[in-house]
């Protein structure tokens, strides 16, 4: 397997692991959420429609039953009707004439479309069967009259009793209708009569059945007296109902015809009775519609995920191929092969990177050409410099000549008895030897550095005599020859203390150099004087110059700034130089250095 193919495969797999969860999982989550939300919304909408339609049917039924009771109240207050019913007629023609002359029942029937029939049944033997007043049959006397035996009592029945013919012409089927029964008070007569008003199923059908919803109405546990489906008229309610529960109510998925359908069952108190009407409303198509919509949502989700996955795979492959192309070009350039492709597909950051790569290659070629030319010039300069160095070496004075000359002068001073001059010359030779010996070196030992500082202070003591004194404190456990330090590190600080701190003192000047060994192999060197010190502004200015990379503006600051930079450059953090000073309170310089063993 080639490197290019491996790189391409790695990039593509990494993008797949990263992008597929980031894109497809949220898409799947959102799709499932929206699908369930749509299904739940459709379910709630269907349930709301069923409940609303059930309420509408309840309103229709309530209007009809209240109207029936109102009609019965009006008839009971009619004295002509009462007189007609309690009269014992001598002839049948007299009774028929009296019944036909009473037109209130006919007007009531004509003015109320909800009434299928309105009849008064009586046990008065002198009244024959007329249009609206008839003799009670034995079956009626047995079933209906006991239900309203109390004067003025009311009963609601789902019954086929009282039909003269079948409900559906050409058949023997009789469909029950909601029947309103109310006894008519005939006191003091011994006769009995009941008002029978039947609710028209056609009226209910026109008022209720104006959609595809299934509706079934019943009174108590009696058979259904109205249903939008002819099959259930005269049958028991098609859904389970707890008739023992007062005010029964159920909605949601209800068992119907062996399946779960969205429906609603509510009750309506039967007016002036203890019975209840049961109203069942079922949406026979809602569940199938919801399942269909849910299936469509899942299909759309699957299609969206398939398209997203295809787009993701295509995009990652296209992107990884472009990355591989760019990587190959960069690999060739890194190996010195600057012959890469001229064009790169796309218009994005990768294209900009490729253009930058071409610019970089062009710059590298230009720089290589310049470097080649610079090397030629450099070699020419080196040759010229070597010739100049040869000439310079030929004219230089041998340092040994200086030492030998100083030693000759010192011996002459001793010979003439001037031992003070001899001592001064010896100290001068010693310091010059140390400086020349350590110029260009990276380190020296602590004992050599302090010996050089002692010689330097001794020379300054000759100059200032008793105007200042100095002391050097070294911990007894510290072996100076075992540790190293930067050469010529302390002399500029000591020189600065003498020239700028103690020079104005006529007497009592003091310079102290103290070495401390701290934990973690740190060496602290404190150089303190009791000179004139510095003001806060001067001290702050000096510290800013030490922290700055710019050149200091005063000659007294140059040495201190150079020392601070040397420490930071050579040792790095946390090693540093710090200064504390106050007017007439002297100056203290603190060097924090690593305690490094000598080589």
Image (cartoon, rainbow, N blue to C red):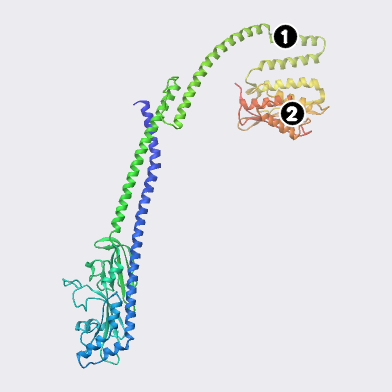
Q: How many marks?
A: 2
Looking at the image, which residue is at 81% across and 27% down? Answer: 504
> Looking at the rendering, which quadrant does residue 39 occupy?
bottom left
The residue singled out by tag 1 in the image is: 404
| Residue 468 image point, x, y percent | 80, 26
| Most distant residue in the right direction | 506
Q: Is residue 503 visible?
A: yes
The answer for how far apart the CA atoms under marks 2 and 1 are is: 34 Å
> Looking at the rendering, which quadrant does residue 278 occupy?
bottom left
Of 246 and 155, the residue lying toward us: 155
Q: Where is 557 relative to 84, above or below?
A: above
| Most distant residue in the bottom direction | 90
| Residue 437 image point, x, y percent | 66, 15
> Looking at the rendering, which quadrant does residue 291 occupy?
bottom left
The residue singled out by tag 2 in the image is: 512
Looking at the image, which residue is at 60% across and 32% down? Answer: 520
| Residue 163 image point, x, y percent | 21, 77
Q: In the displayed structure, does residue 351 sit left or right of residue 594?
A: left
Q: Is residue 155 visible?
A: no
Q: Where is 303 relative to 551, above or below?
A: below
């Amino acid at each position: 397997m080639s490197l290019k193919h491996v790189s391409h495969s790695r990039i593509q797999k990494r993008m797949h692991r990263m992008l597929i969860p980031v894109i497809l999982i949220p898409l799947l989550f959102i799709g499932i959420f929206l699908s369930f939300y749509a299904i739940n919304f459709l379910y709630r909408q269907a349930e709301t429609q069923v409940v609303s339609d059930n309420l509408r049917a309840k309103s229709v039924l309530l209007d009809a039953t209240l109207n029936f009771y109102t009609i019965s109240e009006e008839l009971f207050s009619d004295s002509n009707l009462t007189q007609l019913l309690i009269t014992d007629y001598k002839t049948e023609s007299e009774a028929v004439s009296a019944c036909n002359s009473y037109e209130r029942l006919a007007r009531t029937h004509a003015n109320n479309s909800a009434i299928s029939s309105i009849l008064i049944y009586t046990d008065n033997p002198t009244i024959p069967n007329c249009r609206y007043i008839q003799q009670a049959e034995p079956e009626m006397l047995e079933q209906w009259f006991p239900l309203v035996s109390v004067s003025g009592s009311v009963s609601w029945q789902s019954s086929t009793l009282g039909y003269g013919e079948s409900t559906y012409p050409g058949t023997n089927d009789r469909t029950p209708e909601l029947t309103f029964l109310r006894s008519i008070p005939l006191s003091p007569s011994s006769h009995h009569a009941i008002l029978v008003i039947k609710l028209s199923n056609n009226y209910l059908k026109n008022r209720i059945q104006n959609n595809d919803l299934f509706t079934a109405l019943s009174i108590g546990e009696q058979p259904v007296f109205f249903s939008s489906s002819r099959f259930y008229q005269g049958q028991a309610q098609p859904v389970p109902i707890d008739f023992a529960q007062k005010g029964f109510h159920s909605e949601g998925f209800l068992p119907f015809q062996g399946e779960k359908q969205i429906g609603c069952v509510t009750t309506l108190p039967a007016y002036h009775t203890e019975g209840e009407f049961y109203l069942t409303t079922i949406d026979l198509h809602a569940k199938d519609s919801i399942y269909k919509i849910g299936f469509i949502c899942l299909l759309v989700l699957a299609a969206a995920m398939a398209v997203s996955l295809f787009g993701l795979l295509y995009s990652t492959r296209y992107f990884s191929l472009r990355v591989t192309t760019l990587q190959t070009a960069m690999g060739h350039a890194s190996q010195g092969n600057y012959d890469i492709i001229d064009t790169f597909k796309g218009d994005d950051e990768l294209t900009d990177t490729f253009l930058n790569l071409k610019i970089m290659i062009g710059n590298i070629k230009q720089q290589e050409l310049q470097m080649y030319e610079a090397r030629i010039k450099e070699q020419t300069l080196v040759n010229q410099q070597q010739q100049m160095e040869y000439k310079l070496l030929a004219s230089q004075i041998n340092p040994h000549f200086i030492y030998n000359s100083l030693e000759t002068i010192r011996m002459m001073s001793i010979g003439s008895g001037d031992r003070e001059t001899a001592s001064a010359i010896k100290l001068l030779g010693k310091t010059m030897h140390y400086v020349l010996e350590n110029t260009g070196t990276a380190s020296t030992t602590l004992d050599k550095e302090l010996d050089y500082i002692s010689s330097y202070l001794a020379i300054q003591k000759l100059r200032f005599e008793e105007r200042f004194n100095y002391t050097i404190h070294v911990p007894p456990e510290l072996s100076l020859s075992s540790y190293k330090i930067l050469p010529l590190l302390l002399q500029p600080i000591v020189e600065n203390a003498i020239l700028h701190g103690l020079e104005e003192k006529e007497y009592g000047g003091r310079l102290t150099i103290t070495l401390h060994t701290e934990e973690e192999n740190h060496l602290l060197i404190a150089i303190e004087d009791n000179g004139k010190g510095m003001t806060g502004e001067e001290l702050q200015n000096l510290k800013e110059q030490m922290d700055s990379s710019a050149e200091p503006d005063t000659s007294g600051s140059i040495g201190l700034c150079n020392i601070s930079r040397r420490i930071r450059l050579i040792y790095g953090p946390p090693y540093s130089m710090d200064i504390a000073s106050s007017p007439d309170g002297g100056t203290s310089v603190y060097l924090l250095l690593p305690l490094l063993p000598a080589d």
